[in-house]
Image: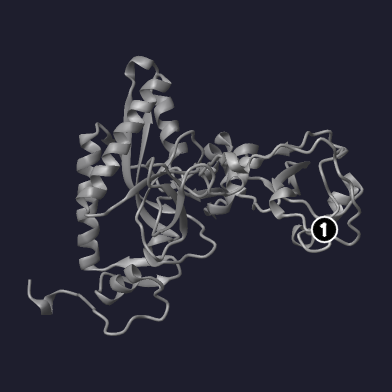
């Protein structure tokens, strides 16, 4: 094809809103153009590249035994209400109405659709296992779209769903997909690190993300060079080194702390209590019930891990007024000793929620991108 008959609008200068190298190159090479925040048009060269990636994905999915389908992007809210994710995933759902004022959803993922399909077509375990995949447009109501195509409101995604008769069979299906992903990234020339990941609002028992190391990214990963362990910071676990495990004193020492309301203040003279020898008491409201969360003083709460413990994302930090009404004390004057909640819910000592290097020699790494949770 002659140059005069094609359309490759290259740019000499980088647009001001391009944040990372990949976004800048896509724009300057004339592969994509921005319509508005989180929405992009693929130009001829960009679409050719996209179709080549899709072909690699199709070949590896077929090789793994998956069958391609194409499900509607427009979905009825009833199937999301049955699964319970109409509430738990509400933050990412695009909603719209038709001329009859009936509500519809633009699908951020397709678990509800595929399970509705399979429930109506498969009636016996003898028809299993089955694995379906699609390459379809997804819509997610991102609060702040960024990084070009990496965090957009509308994007094309491959999603696959396996149906198995036993847990053992499901793990075999999972491993086939894991291996297929590894081959896809290898064929695309990407160096990836598979890491354990949180399943997020999409749910599930196991999750891995294939991370691409990059200086610019929005994900934090920890990994161990000696044992090969790697995990998203929201999933990572660690054990305290033996040198840090201390035996408590035989007697509890009591001393007054007038006006001291923070961990930092208690580390200062005349108290000089190290932060790692203090207990941080947090109060959260979980489904209308107050919960006490106890952390080591120098640790920070990871709300993604907290959601896993609670089994819900519907929680928030309690206000000072709510805390006082239940405990008779305000933030800065709370503790686990003699604490009684009117809701009669037990408090949790959630040491695993805190981030730390732990027994493994963990290093921190930035990652360029991740697949959306649950995909």
Residue at the image position 11 percent from the left and 80 percent from the top: 4
Residue at 27% across, 34% down: 66
Q: Nearer the viewer, residue 375 or 186?
A: 186
Q: x, y percentage for residue 290?
A: 79, 42
Above or below for 253 versus 331: above
Is 37 situated left or right of 303 in this image?
Answer: left
Q: SS class of the residue under badge 1?
A: loop
Q: Can residue 185 be seen from the camera position used here? A: yes
Name the residue beneath numbered marker 1: 271
Question: In this picture, is 224 found above or below 140?
Answer: above
Q: Position of residue 370 (x, y in %)?
A: 41, 53
Choose top left, top right, bottom left or bottom right for residue 2: bottom left
282 or 183: nearer the eye?
Answer: 282
Q: Position of residue 194 (x, y in %)?
A: 36, 45
Q: Is residue 239 left or right of residue 221?
A: right
Residue 305: image quadrant is top right
**Local crowd size for mark 1, using a 10 Å CA cut-off: few (<14), some (14–19), many (≥20):** few
Q: Looking at the image, which residue is at 79% across and 34% down?
A: 345
Check the picture and name the quadrant holding the C terminus.
Answer: top left
Where does the N terminus fall, quadrant-wise?
A: bottom left
């Amino acid at each position: 094809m002659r140059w005069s008959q094609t359309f490759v609008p290259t740019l000499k200068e980088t647009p001001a809103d391009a944040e990372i190298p990949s976004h800048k190159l896509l724009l300057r090479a004339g592969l994509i153009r921005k319509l508005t925040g989180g929405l992009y048009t693929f130009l001829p060269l960009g679409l050719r590249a996209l179709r080549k990636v899709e072909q690699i994905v199709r070949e590896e999915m077929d090789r793994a035994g998956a069958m391609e389908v194409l499900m509607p992007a427009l979905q009825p809210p009833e199937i999301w209400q049955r699964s319970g994710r109409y509430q738990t995933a509400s933050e990412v759902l695009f909603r719209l109405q038709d001329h009859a004022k009936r509500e519809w959803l633009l699908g951020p993922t397709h678990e509800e659709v595929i399970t509705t399909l399979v429930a109506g077509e498969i009636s016996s375990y003898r028809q299993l296992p089955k694995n379906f995949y699609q390459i379809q447009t997804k819509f997610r109501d991102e609060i702040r779209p960024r990084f070009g195509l990496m965090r957009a409101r509308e994007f094309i995604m491959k999603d696959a769903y396996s149906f198995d008769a036993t847990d053992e069979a499901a793990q075999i299906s999972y491993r086939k997909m894991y291996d297929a992903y590894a081959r896809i990234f290898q064929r695309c020339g990407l160096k990836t690190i598979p890491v354990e990941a949180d399943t997020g609002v999409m749910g599930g028992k196991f999750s891995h993300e294939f991370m691409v190391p990059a200086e610019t990214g929005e994900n934090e990963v920890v990994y161990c060079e000696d044992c090969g362990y790697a995990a998203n910071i929201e999933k990572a676990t660690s054990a305290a080194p033996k040198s840090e495990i201390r035996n408590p004193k035989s007697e509890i020492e009591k001393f007054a702390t007038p006006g001291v309301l923070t961990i930092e203040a208690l580390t200062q003279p005349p108290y000089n209590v190290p932060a790692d020898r203090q207990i941080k008491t947090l109060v959260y409201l979980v489904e209308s019930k107050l919960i006490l969360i106890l952390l080591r003083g120098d640790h920070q709460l990871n709300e993604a891990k907290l959601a896993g413990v609670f089994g819900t994302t519907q929680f928030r930090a309690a206000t000072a007024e709510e805390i006082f009404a239940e405990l008779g004390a305000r933030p800065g004057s709370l503790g686990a000793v003699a604490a009684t909640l009117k809701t009669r819910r037990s408090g949790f000592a959630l040491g695993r929620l805190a981030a730390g290097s732990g027994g493994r020699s963990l290093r921190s790494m930035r990652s360029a991108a991740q697949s959306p949770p649950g995909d």
